């Protein structure tokens, strides 16, 4: 299934062929439906962080992502697309040049 280049790359990245084969088999077979027992809320699946903590996480992200080629976030479902609609709209509007108005 894997060629020599694949095996070399796995070794360089510290990956085991058996684990990769197991993961691929999981995708072939599919995954069982998740039993949802309740919505996530603050303190139960969602962390509520302070402004200072948010700034620390932003700094950590900027530091760790420097030099990485971040391309695009693609939600996996229509619900996620709707959930992030305002974020996508903000991103689009912030990338467009602002038109000067003459008054």
Image (tube, helix red, strand yellow):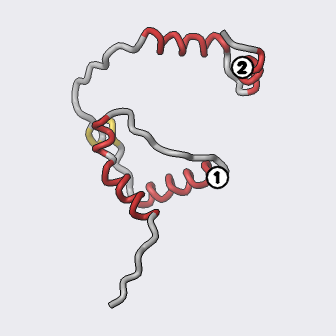
- Circle nearer the N terminus (1, 2): 2
Towards the viewer: 49 or 39: 39
- Where the C terminus falls, by quadrant? bottom left
Quadrant of res 92: bottom left
Locate residue 23, reporting x and y percent: 54, 15
Locate residue 90, reporting x and y percent: 37, 59
Which residue is at a point 69% across and 13% down the rendered structure image? 2
> Are the two marked residues, 1 and 2, in contact with CB atoms closer than 8 angstroms?
no
Q: Which residue is mark 1?
A: 66
Please identify the residue farthest to the bottom as the structure is shown. Answer: 103
Q: Residues within 10 Å of mark 1 (few under 14, many from 20)?
A: few
Q: CA distance from mark 1 to mark 2?
A: 27 Å
Nearer mark to the viewer, of 1 and 2: 2
Q: Is residue 56 left or right of residue 85?
A: right
- Where the N terminus falls, by quadrant? top right
Q: Which residue is mark 2?
A: 6
């Amino acid at each position: 299934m894997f060629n020599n280049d694949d095996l070399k790359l796995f070794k360089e990245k510290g990956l085991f062929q058996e684990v990769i084969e197991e993961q691929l088999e999981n995708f072939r077979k599919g995954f069982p439906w998740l039993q949802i027992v309740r919505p996530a809320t603050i303190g139960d699946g969602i962390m509520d962080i302070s402004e200072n903590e948010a700034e620390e996480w932003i700094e950590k992200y900027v530091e760790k992502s420097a030099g990485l080629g971040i391309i695009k976030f693609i939600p996996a479902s229509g619900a996620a697309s709707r959930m992030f609609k305002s974020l996508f709209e903000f991103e689009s509007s912030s990338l467009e040049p602002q038109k000067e108005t003459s008054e």
